[in-house]
Image (tube, rainbow, N blue to C red):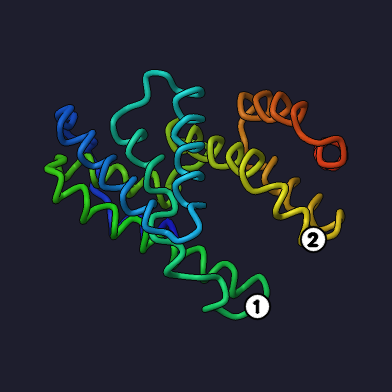
């Protein structure tokens, strides 16, 4: 479903690079949108995500840099509770959220003067079209998983038993590349002992 949506939102060629002004203007708009989220979580999340993308891909393309700033754009307006409980409901929510993030991102990129084909590439990255086969999609996914470990893991662990947490971590681990695994293990060394132990059990 997400890949089909990605085909609707994207074009095939990456296009020309945006100017420095349009790139920074778009990032500033994304930051402002995240800052409007009441808890501050959205801005913290995207700051960490952008940092991890920079670590994993120092020469990241403009599209990849932009995608890191709008991965969950406006997600607080589309809560998980709006969809049925269970795996099917979760997948529907994730698919709908990916489409909405891409739609909002394209509107902001257009307003910032970013070349439409660069905006299309951002859409491809956001819906994870080509995970495993597209190096940039894989880099973004690695960065998303690392951000979960650094930003969200502690809060998630406080709400769920260890077996649920281990299951989520194993699914996260399966989506990552060897490079992502190496960085995740480095991150785990800085976690509180209880969380580090759960991560070790999940990836062993």
* Residue appearing at x 73%, y 52% in the figure: 168
Tell me the mark number nearer the camera, choosing from 2 and 1.
2
Q: Name the foreground residue: 58 vs 125.
A: 58
Taking the spot 45% from the left edge, 43% from the top edge, the residue there is: 46
Residue at horizontal 27%, vertical 51%?
Answer: 10
Q: Position of residue 117 (x, y in %)?
A: 19, 42
Q: CA distance from mark 2 to mark 1?
A: 16 Å
For label 2, the crowd category at 10 Å Cα-Cα, with few meaning under 14, some 14 to 19 and many 20 or more, is: few
Q: Which percent across, then down, holds residue 111?
A: 14, 50
On the rendered structure, is 69 left or right of 108? Answer: right
Label 1 environment density (alpha carbons within 10 Å; few <14, some 14–19, many ≥20): few
> Which structural element holds mark 2?
loop
Q: Closer to the N terminus: mark 2 or mark 1?
A: 1
Residue occupied by mark 2: 160
Residue 174 figure quarter:
top right
Instruction: Report the side of 182 relative to 199 (left or right).
Output: left
Q: Left or right of 61: which side holds 173? A: right
Assign the C terminus to one quadrant of the image: top right
Q: Position of residue 154 (x, y in %)?
A: 72, 48
Using residue 141 as the reference point, say whether residue 162 is left or right of it: right
Q: Farthest top residue?
A: 58
Residue identified by numbered label 1:
85
């Amino acid at each position: 479903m997400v890949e089909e949506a990605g085909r609707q939102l994207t074009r095939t060629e990456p296009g020309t690079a945006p100017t420095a002004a349009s790139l920074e203007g778009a990032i500033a708009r994304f930051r402002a949108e995240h800052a409007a989220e009441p808890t501050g979580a959205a801005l913290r999340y995207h700051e960490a995500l952008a940092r991890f993308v920079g670590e994993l891909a120092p020469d990241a393309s403009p599209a990849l840099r932009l995608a890191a700033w709008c991965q969950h754009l406006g997600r607080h307006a589309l809560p998980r509770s709006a969809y049925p409980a269970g795996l099917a409901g979760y997948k529907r929510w994730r698919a709908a959220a990916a489409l909405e993030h891409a739609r909002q991102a394209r509107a902001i990129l257009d307003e910032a003067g970013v070349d439409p084909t660069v905006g299309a590439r951002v859409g491809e990255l956001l819906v994870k079209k080509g995970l495993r086969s597209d190096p940039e999609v894989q880099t973004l996914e690695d960065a998303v998983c690392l951000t979960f470990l650094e930003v969200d893991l502690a809060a998630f662990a406080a709400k769920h038993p260890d077996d649920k947490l281990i299951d989520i971590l194993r699914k996260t681990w399966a989506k990552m590349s060897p490079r992502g695994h190496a960085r995740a293990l480095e991150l785990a060394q800085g976690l509180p002992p209880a969380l580090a132990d759960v991560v070790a059990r999940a990836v062993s």
